[in-house]
Amino acid sequence: EFTHRLLSRRETILLGGDPVTGKTWTYIMMAQRAYEEAQATGKDSPRFFVFDLDDTLGAYLDADGGGEFAHLYVENGGNIYPYPAMTWAEIGGAVRVVESLAQRSDWIVWDTISRLYDRAQQQFAASMGTTVEDLIAAKIDKMGINRAGFGAFEPSEWNAIGRMHDAFFDHLITQTRANILALAHVREQVEKRAKREGKFLYDSFGLEPVTAPRVSKVMETSILLYSWLVIRKDERGGRVGAPVARREMAIAKDRGKAYGVRVPYDTDLYETL
């Protein structure tokens, strides 16, 4: 007989950022801290199941390639399980494996969720017997670059692509109780683009994650990372010293509550998460 019960809370975090802002480093350090705590206490470490869609983890985990964190690779007794899925079929196979393994307190990491959206578009175009690039070129030839709109597809086709994406993304949320960390690329906001599924959260930052529309709505916490160079000048406008890199994170949503603040961050960002 089905009866009432309370599901334990888990973290669902969308972490967007430019290249080299520390997205991958963040979960590597989360895994490192969990590994060290397990070594010290004798308890099992949470596991990190990573959909490595950007081919990132080799630089960190491959001992032969100089990976600093090779000890975290599961084959070396660590807690990171990489799944370098580069095709739609490989992603589907990895999703089924991770669903069967992930437990409460584990982490499922999309590195990056932006690539899952790309793969869904590529798969949909392939089902039409063409490619995304050819569809874009045909649309520009027909309508002109200023009228071609955003991308290769018609509204009904974008809806189908979103459903393909969500079939994998939602599945791991509903069928596991693991924590979810989805990394995303970012872009400057496109003012003409209609804001859907919580994208208005990013208005004050001028940036938005590159994801399927549903992702921003589903994830309870949403953080964007960005950096810039500060150039100091004297009274005459001459440059003083070398440019200084500054990093900030924009917290758009924190555990379901709109937040809208910017704060500096450093390599210890993983402590915040």
Image (cartoon, grey):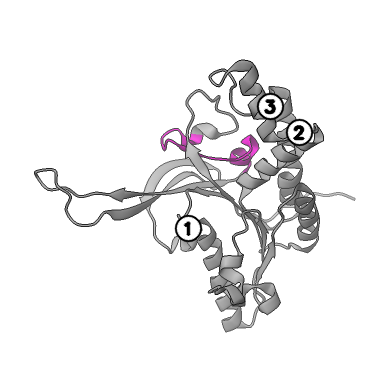
Percent from the top left, x then y, of residue 200? 50, 31
Residue under pointer 2: 130
Q: Is residue 246 left or right of residue 196?
A: left
Which residue sits at x=68%, y=27%? Answer: 153
Q: Amino acid at mark 1?
A: Gly
Q: Dot 1: what SS?
A: loop
Which residue sits at x=65%, y=22%? Answer: 139
Q: Amino acid at mark 2?
A: Thr
Gap in angstroms between the C-alphas marked 3 and 1:
33 Å
Gap in angstroms between the C-alphas marked 1 and 2:
36 Å
Percent from the top left, x then y, of residue 51? 68, 56
Q: Is residue 80 left or right of residue 199?
A: right
Q: Nearer the viewer, residue 125 or 186?
A: 125
User: Are the residues tagged 3 and 2 within 8 Å (C-beta)?
Assistant: no
Q: Dot 3: what SS?
A: loop
Among the two numbered marks 3 and 2 on one chain, the one whose residue lies closer to the N terminus: 2
Percent from the top left, x then y, of residue 231? 24, 49
Q: Dot 2: what SS?
A: loop
Q: Which residues are magenta?
A: 201-218
User: Are the residues tagged 1 and 2 within 8 Å (C-beta)?
Assistant: no
User: Are the residues tagged 3 and 1 within 8 Å (C-beta)?
Assistant: no
Asked if one can make out residue 152 in the rendered structure from this viewpoint, the answer is: no
Of badges 3 and 1, nearer the viewer stands 3
Residue under pointer 1: 22
Residue under pointer 3: 153
Is 143 situated above or below 179? above
